[in-house]
Every structure is written in structure tokens, then in C-alpha cells.
Amino acid sequence: MSIIEAKDVSIRYLTGDFKDIGLKEYVVRKLRGNYHVTEFWADRHITFSLEKGDMLGIIGSNGAGKSTLLKAVSGIMVPTEGSLKISGNIAALLELASGFDKDLTVRENAYLRGAMLGYTRNFMNEKYESIIDFAELQDFQDRPFKQLSSGMKSRLAFSIACLVNPDILILDEVLSVGDGAFAKKSGDKMKEILKSGVTGILVSHSLPRVRNLCNKILWIDHGKQVAFTDEVNLYCDAYEEFLNSKILPEDREQVKAMAANLKKRKDKAKLLANRNEAQKLEDMLNKGTSDAAIQAAISLLKKKKPQVLK
Amino acid sequence: MEILNYNWIKNTFIKLKKHQFLFEELVKRDFKQKYKRTVLGMAWSILSPLLTLLVLKVIFSHFFGQRIAHYTIYLFCGNLLFSYFSESTRTGMGALMSNAGIFSKVNIPKYLFLFSKNISSLINFLLTLCVFFIFVFFEGIPFTLKFFALLYPVCCLIIFNLGIGLILSALFVFFRDIGYLYNVFTMLLMYASAIFYTIETFPEKYQMVFYLNPVFCNIAYFRSIVLEDTIPSLNLHILCFLYAVIALFIGTFIYKKFNHKFLYYI
């Protein structure tokens, strides 16, 4: 049985006149028949389904409708058309750093955030110490939140969020948190959670991460579904090629061709890099004023490829 | 009507229970936000109505003081209920807007934000109510069993404020003008609530007009118990109840209807 089943999901945003106009303008425009609301489809006909333990990577350029789709899955928005069936409880970690209150202390913010994520008070009492330890904020517990650096803020957010024990986990660009050491720690923690058998959805612009963590891929472009597939590497290759060429594939053949193109391009680049290196070495040898450089070259050849000297 | 559906009401209570922890934390946050950077902190919730009372007393004693018995208590009744109404609805108005960053990221019931704002004004109100009883005591008005009937207008006003808060906070998302309009409206309503004068100075046929004002109805109830030691007529009971229920009904209806649409407007 599928944990998440999205059938032909379309989500419409309303934009246009109704926003940012006052009451007076609203009445005036209504009377004149000058009141326009335009529709904007953030997602169109998206279909996918996930089984238990699946990890879906959603890829697509900025504004493709990835975050909107996540909002629908996590229940913040409802699909305008189509159906979305979800079984199990969801934890959605969207843009972690927002939603804190700058005047409350770190401790108070931790509890507030925990409450928002649906934890109980007992659970938070129990885990509070380990949250602070993980975030490395022991000395800041009773400081107002606004005094923290932005790195510390996201560290706290991550530490609270990674306690979740949901059936479905939604991650939107949260893996890259903090400085190098913490980024590694958080990455490890994330992997640990994902290995525990949750069903996950990950939105990330980091393709190596998607290749590493996901077993299914949903590729969206300008709200339209390009592909939903479990051939992760093939489609990631094609997507990388797409980022370069900006041409969408129309069928599987083209995807293959694009992946091949990418390989060709990468080989070419490697070749070029090698050639550059050889060139550099030659230049260095040429620049040598004494015979020392030539001597060094000859002795290296003697050691590594004696057959050339003969 | 779906709103009156038994299951829906039951689900709402289950949800409330589920989000109890969040609710408590929100209340705490709102309290802290309210008194940040004030020296006297919570003392203001008692001081500010007392200062208003003092101003009213100084200005209006001369005009109405002789004709109305226990004029301080008379003023206090009006001021107590009206400031609760105006504070709770005014702060409630921004409840959705100021928490937009949260409910556009996490799926939690939106009315919680309003409820929590309402709780902090309710606590203020209850504190002032205690001060009110102290005043009543020193004025030499005897406490009788009938004072327990005061629970009725208090409950009605709580529900009424909640309903108006729901309506205003939703409208505020759509039209920011509401903020300015509402300020003018509350001023008008204050003058129409007979806080410092009595409606008996008006001809009988105009006196009925005052009962169109829900806040006045509750004030009249209060005064009747405290100053006249009489339980008001059944009509007044029904009126207070109806206003409260209608406001709550409209508010819930708007929230239910626009629950997923608020997102587009922020």
C-alpha cells in the first residue's frame, strides 16, 4: 500500500489585484469592473506515489513548484485539482530558521518550536538537554534569541527538528546547516533518521546529495512534471545536462542521450584538464635555466618508464 | 449546516487537546511580547484601567456624579467590560497577520493564535475584576449570592470577544484598512455604551437603541447585579446570549471557509 499517493495534483495560486489594495480600491475596482484576479498554476498534473521506506528527491530549477508541492503534502495548502492521499503522520521541516521569536530566550524558543512540531511537553523536558548539546548552545540557553548568530539559529532549528519520529519526513533544503563541522554532524544525523525506515521527501539543489540519499526522483519544471522515476543516476545525469543546455527531454531516449552528452562533456573536460596539466609541466621545464630540470625529468623517466629512453 | 455538525465540534476539541502544549507556549509568548521593555510589566494591566477610571471620574463627576449613586462603581462597571472588549478584539485583530510566518510553514490550526491572544486579555480582565470587587467592598456595597450571576455576562462577553476576534483577524488579512476603521468604530461604540452617563436621560423609545450594542447589554447586566442587586430580565439574558453565539458563528464560518485561502493574501 502506498504511503503517499498524488494523482494529477494541480495547485493554483491566485495573484493580481486583490493583494495589497485597500478597501477603497477594492470597492472602486469592483464597481468599475476593473477588478482582475489572475491565476497562476504553481503545479500542474503531478502524479507520483511512494511506498514505505522510499526516499523521493524532488529536483527542478528555482520556481519550479517544489516548495508548493511540499506545502500541499504537509497539509498547509490543499490541491486545487487532483487528489492527494497520505497515510501516517507527517513532520515537515520547511525553511527552518523562520518562525522563531527574537525576544524570547533560546530555551523558550526551543519549547515553542517543539510545540509547533507537535511534540509533547514531557518529550521536550526529556530531550531538551540533548537538543542544546547537539546544537552546541550550552552557554546561550538564557540569552534572547536575537543575540545568536544566524548559524547558531539554524543549528538550534535543526537540532529540534531532527528529534522527530514520523512516518513521513519532508525536508526542504535543511541539510546544509552551519559551519563545516556541524554540516557533517547534521548530515550524519539526517542519514541516520532516513535509515530508520521513514518515508521521505527531499528537496535539494545538491545533486550529489540526491544521488546519495534518494531512490526515486520527481523532476519538475515550471510546474510541469518532467519525470517520476526510480532510475536516479540516469535522470540526475540528464538533469545536470539540462542545467547546462536548458533543453527539456521529451522522452526516455532523449534522457539517455542527455546523460550520454553529460558523460561526453565530462570526459572532454577531464581531457582538457589533463592537457592543461601537461602543458603546465612543460612550461615549467622550459623555464628552467640550468640543466637541473632536464636531469630531473630524465631521472623520473628512468624510474617510471625506462622503455621511452631506449 | 456543517458547522453545527456534532462530529466537527468533537474533532475541534480533539485538536485542541492535541495542541494543548503549543497553545500554552503561544500564550506564554504573547504575554512576554506584551510586557517586554516595560518597567512595571504586568502591573500595567491593573494600573491602566485604574488610570482611565481616574480620568473619567475627574472629568464626569461634575456632570453626572450627583445623579447616579455609587458613581465610581458605575463608571468602573462600564470601563471594566468595555476595555476588556476593546483590548481583546484589538489585539486579536493582528493574530493571524503577525503569525503568518508560522502558519505558512507549519500545519497548525490557525485559530490557536487568536485564542492565545484572547487568553492574555482575559487574564488582564480577571485581574481588573478582582480590583473591581475590592472597590465594591470599600464602597460599602454588600456582596450577595446574586453576584454569582455575574458569571453569565462574563461568559457571554468571552464568547462574543472570541467571535469578533475571529471575524476581525480574518478581515484584517484581506484588508489592512480594517485596523483604522476599527479604531474609529470602537470610539463610537464606547460613547454608545453609556459608560459615564445613564440611558435614563433619553426618552423611552430611544433607550431601546442602546440594546443593539452587545457590549452595553453586558454592562447593563453587570450594573443591575452590582448596583441594584436584581437579576435582570429574561430578555437581557437572551440578548447577551444571542450576540455571543452569532458572533462566534460568523467567526467560525469565516475561518472554516477561508482556512486555506489566508495563505494567498500574506
Image (cartoon, coloured by chain):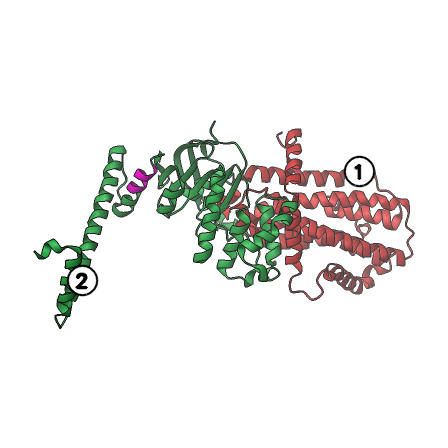
Q: Main secondary structure of the magenta part?
A: helix
Q: Is residue A229 left or right of residue A147?
A: left
Q: Is residue B212 left or right of residue A243?
A: right
- What's drawn in magenta, residue-wise? A232-238
Provide residue B11's location: percent of width, then percent of height: 64, 33
Instruction: Specify whether residue A30 is in view.
Output: no
Q: Amino acid at mark 1?
A: Asn
* Label 1 sits on residue: B235
Q: Is residue B118 left or right of residue A92?
A: right
Provide residue B151's location: percent of width, then percent of height: 80, 44
Provide residue B139's location: percent of width, then percent of height: 89, 58
* Label 2 sits on residue: A280
Label 2 crowding class (10 Å Cα cut-off): few <14, some 14-19, many 20+? few
**Farthest residue toward the bottom?**
A289
> B179 or A232: which is nearer to us?
A232
Q: Amino acid at mark 2?
A: Lys
- The colour assigned to chain B within the rendered structure: red
Provide residue A22's location: percent of width, then percent of height: 51, 51
Q: Are marks 2 and 1 on the same chain?
A: no
In the image, residue A236 lies in the stretch drawn in magenta: yes
Chain on which label 2 sits? A
Instruction: Report the Cα–Cα distance between label 2 and label 1.
Output: 99 Å
Image depth: mark 2 or mark 1 in front: 2
In the image, residue A76 lies in the stretch drawn in magenta: no
What residue is rendered at 51% in x and 58% in y?
A152
Callout 1: helix, strand or loop? helix
